[in-house]
Image (cartoon, rainbow, N blue to C red):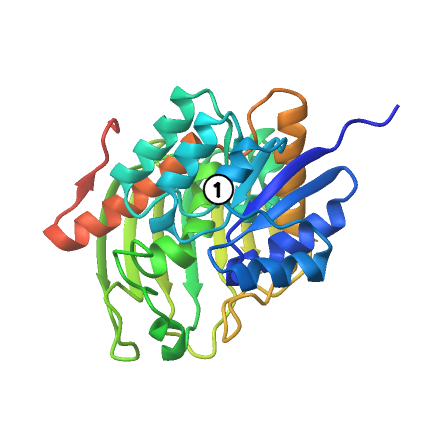
Amino acid sequence: MTQKPVRLAIIGLGMASKPHLAALKQLAPDIEVGGVFARSPERRSEIAQIFGWPAFESLEAICESDVDGAVVITPPNARREIVAALAAAGKAVLMEKPVERDLARAIELVEICEAANTPLGMVLQHRFRVGAETLTKHIANGAAGEIHMARVSLPWWRDQSYYDAPGRGTFAVDGGGVLLTQAIHVLDLMLSLVGPAARVAALCGTTRLHQMEAEDFATAGLVFANGAHGAVTATTASFPGFAESLELDCEHGSFRLKAGELSIDWRDGRSETVGEVTGTGGGSDPMDFPCDWHRDLIADFADALRNNRPPRVTGRAALEVHRLIDAIERSNREGRCIQLEGAS
């Protein structure tokens, strides 16, 4: 007996929707697209015709429809009204990162969904890469042993034309720069493996390569709640853009995840490689990466709805990376080490 398809609406059809649309096409018929919606009638009509999906005329029409939930791919400043309406209508929400423009707004949005008992999943798809999933298993089953150090490097590039788009790289629309828009993925993955940060000392700034309001460079030293130490460097001013990496130095080996490929050097002399190098969107084309990770994340979200369980990346879980980014930004502004709330 075949299971009933999960029906999802798509809200927001800008640049970030590209991997979502491709992934949902691959996920048919287990997941059906009940309709697409964007503020521009021309854009939603165009996408509806290309993919053969219906188009919704309004947010209200989505809330009144028979869809089980919606994939929200709007800019961060256009989320609250949409999510509140969906939650009130009992529609599950899968939302593109970040949760909101800052930590306080992100907490408020998560609490709106929790108060309505509405599932909220986040698109932090780097957790679904093959190399990342293998690394997660080695950490979870104890094979790696204790984590002693974590290092993140994100040497990406964005041309000035990227930031010339209205609202791009501003606090009012994006909520920030390289941290919240680009580095959030690898920072979220790091926290999912190492656990929350306890102390942060950071510097952020805008290089002379860009004209923008928010930061295009950030670096931070970290101490995690479990005692591990860490370092983060992220920028969109490294031409022509290079693959991001996450390195963990552990009790039983060292693990390097770069552009989806995991390299392991075990202390007993073994070496192995898992996954493969793929596009990351770190160069001139921000969308230069496959849709596989989005596909697996969306499939997990649909399965969570079918089986009445939380998705693998919930809105509540995503608040951890927001807390870290907030601490990095505060450390830079205040010129001091920040002790994160609740950390010993």
Q: Which residue sits at x=51%, y=54%?
A: 38
Label 1 neighbour load within 10 Å: few <14, some 14-19, many 20+? some
Residue tagged by mark 1?
A: 59
* Residue nearest the observer in this picture, 343 or 327: 327
On the rendered image, what quadrant is the C terminus found in? Answer: top left
Q: In the rendering, at what x and y percent does residue 183 appear?
A: 41, 56
Whether residue 130 is visible to the viewer of this picture, yes or no, is no
Say which amino acid is labelled 1.
Leu
* Left or right placement of residue 18 versus residue 283 in this view: right
Q: In the rendering, at what x and y percent does residue 326 appear?
A: 26, 45
Relative to 322, does residue 333 appear above or below in the rendering? below
* Left or right placement of residue 192 versus residue 303 in this view: left
Q: Which residue sits at x=38%, y=20%?
A: 115
* Left or right placement of residue 108 versus residue 25 in this view: left
Give the total of numbered labels: 1
Q: Which residue sits at x=47%, y=46%?
A: 249
Whether residue 310 is visible to the viewer of this picture, yes or no, is yes
Relative to 208, does residue 290 appear above or below in the rendering? above
